[in-house]
Structures are given as structure tokens and as C-alpha cells.
Amino acid sequence: MAPVLSGSPPPDDRRALPIGVFDSGVGGLTVLHELLVSLPREDFLYLGDSARLPYGTRAPHELRAFAVETGEELLARGAKLLVVACNSATATALEHLRRHVAATDRETDVIGVVGPESNLAVAATRSGRIGLLATPATVTSGAYERAVQGADALTRLTSVACPDLAAIIEEDAPVTRRVVETVRGYCGPLIDARVDTVILGCTHYPLVRPMLQRILGPDVRLITSGAAMVRRVQHALSVRDLVATRPGEGHYAFLTTGDAARFRATGTRFLQLPIEEVEHVDLTTRAAA
Ligand code: DGL
């Protein structure tokens, strides 16, 4: 991390510590983007587990193990709050990671994208028909169904698993016809179900937001994780008295289990802000220790 700015709280003050954010790769930078824009004074440390991408087709036991390893790395580097930016990891492993952190006697809060996004979608719908586009791991977990039903038992969720969409969005830049046709195919069941609100249940989908809006129609509300997370993070920091008090902008730094140069090159498109230092980390070393 870059050094603490002059005028910042002393280093032992937890308010000056970074917020840890993790994802399976660069996709979670769409969530970090929203957090950087809305919480400019905070420091952020982002970990992209690119070496084990994709998470969206992984089994639950793998995602639980990965969540603990990535969470531990960020906690070891002083994270004051853990944000699980990955929808697949949140849907499958959030409770497991929370229990792990609590069992090891740490008070760090662990927050994920499913709850805040579902609440926003339920608040936005007028017809009570909501759509979900997400990876197979997320859809199979049933996490969005439970969250939406928990917020409003009368709301109906139509879920569409999109096994290849995240990879196609990442590979095809600038946007190709293959992206448009893939997105169109996944929107079909949502149009048939006449949903008026659609949850973008994967980190990558904000990049195809304009074409989703065009295909689904201008009256359909699109809900993204990043926007939903901002309020949840603000709340978590406030109740624990962890809001950064320094003047000016915070720092943001990156770790990846994959290739640092590739992370920087691909990640800039997702973050829409400059990415400078990227450090390679090996999580399997930590797990073996
Ligand atoms: N970050 C993942 C998610 O939001 C998408 C990419 C992947 O499959 O790892 O579910």
C-alpha cells in the first residue's frame, strides 16, 4: 500500500485501515469502481483470484475454501472490513466465511452483494416480477431466491444461468456481435416472464448494461451490485466507527493470484480508473502454512 497521508489518523487507528475487496478476477472492479466514486476518502485493497477464475462454474466446497483463503490474505494485510464483490462467492460462501472470521475471534464484518442487490430490486419493482442474470454457481445456490423472498414473499424471481457470458465479456473487447447475440439469448426468458426489474447478478454484467437496457426495453430497471453495495458499506463502517477521517482521497492497491501485467491491462476496462501497482500473491502458500 502507498504510505498513509500526512494528517491521517495514527496507524493504530482502525479507521485508517483499508477496506478489503475480493473477487475471482477483474470483474469485481465494477464493484470497486462504485465504492471508489462514493467513498473517496477510504483506502481499498483489492484481491483478484485470477489464477482460479472462473468461480461461476465451481463447486460450493471449492468456493468456500477460496473465500477463506482470499479473506485471510486481506485480513493479514490489515483489512478493517471484508467485501465479497463476487456474486458466485457471496451466493455460495458468504456465511461460511463469516463463521470462519467470527470463530477466529475477529470482529471484522464480512459483507456480500446478494442481500443489498436483492433489497434494491424488491424496492424497485412495481409488478413484483424480477429477473436475475447470473453464473450457474449463483443460480444453483438459490441465494437470490431466498433473499428476494425474505424481502417480499409475494415477489417472483425468474433466474437465468449464463455459463459463458462473463468469459465472453472479458474476452471480447471492444464489444463484438458474439456478445450482443449471447446477451440477447439470455434475455429471452426475462422478456417472456414480463419482468420489470433485472438483477445483474455477476460482476461482469455492468459492462453490457447499455445493450441489456436496449434489449429489455427502457422501462426495465437494471440493478447492479456496485450501486447496491455502497449504502451497505457506508452503514457497516458507521456502526463500527470505522469511517476514514483523513482529508483528501484515499489510496487503492491491487493483488492478484494471476499475472500482474494482464490484470492491469484487463482491469482498467472494468475499473474505469487508472491501475498502477499490482502485486502477485500466492494463496496456496498461505493455505499450506
Ligand atoms: N466474479 C464472478 C461472479 O460475479 C464472475 C466471473 C467468474 O465466473 O469467476 O459470479
Image (cartoon, rainbow, N blue to C red):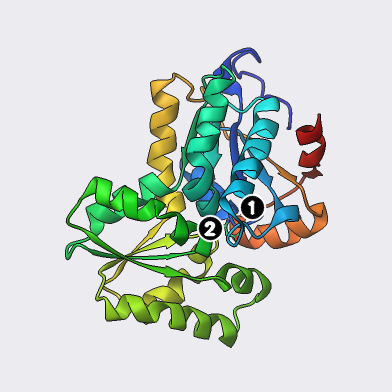
Residue drawn at 58 percent across, 35 percent down: 249
Classify residue 14 by image quadrant.
top right
186 sits left or right of 126 in the view: right
Q: Is residue 10 above or below residue 152?
A: above
Query: Percent from the top left, x then y, of residue 3?
Result: 73, 26
In terms of secondary structure, where does tag 1 sit? loop
- On whether ligand 1 comes within 8 Å of the CB at mark 1, the answer is yes
2 sits left or right of 206 in the view: right
According to the picture, the residue beneath numbered tag 2 turns out to be: 203
According to the picture, the residue beneath numbered tag 1 turns out to be: 24
Res 39 seen here? no
Q: Is residue 39 above or below residue 133?
A: above
Query: Percent from the top left, x then y, of residue 17?
Result: 61, 24
- On whether ligand 1 comes within 8 Å of the CB at mark 2, the answer is yes
Q: Is residue 196 above or below residue 284?
A: below
The one of 152 and 220 positioned closer to us in this rendering: 152
The one of 103 and 275 positioned closer to us in this rendering: 103
Query: Percent from the top left, x then y, of residue 207?
Result: 53, 67
Residue type, numbered disc 2: Thr
Badge 2 vs badge 1, beta-carbon distance below 8 Å: yes
Residue drawn at 26 percent across, 51 percent down: 149
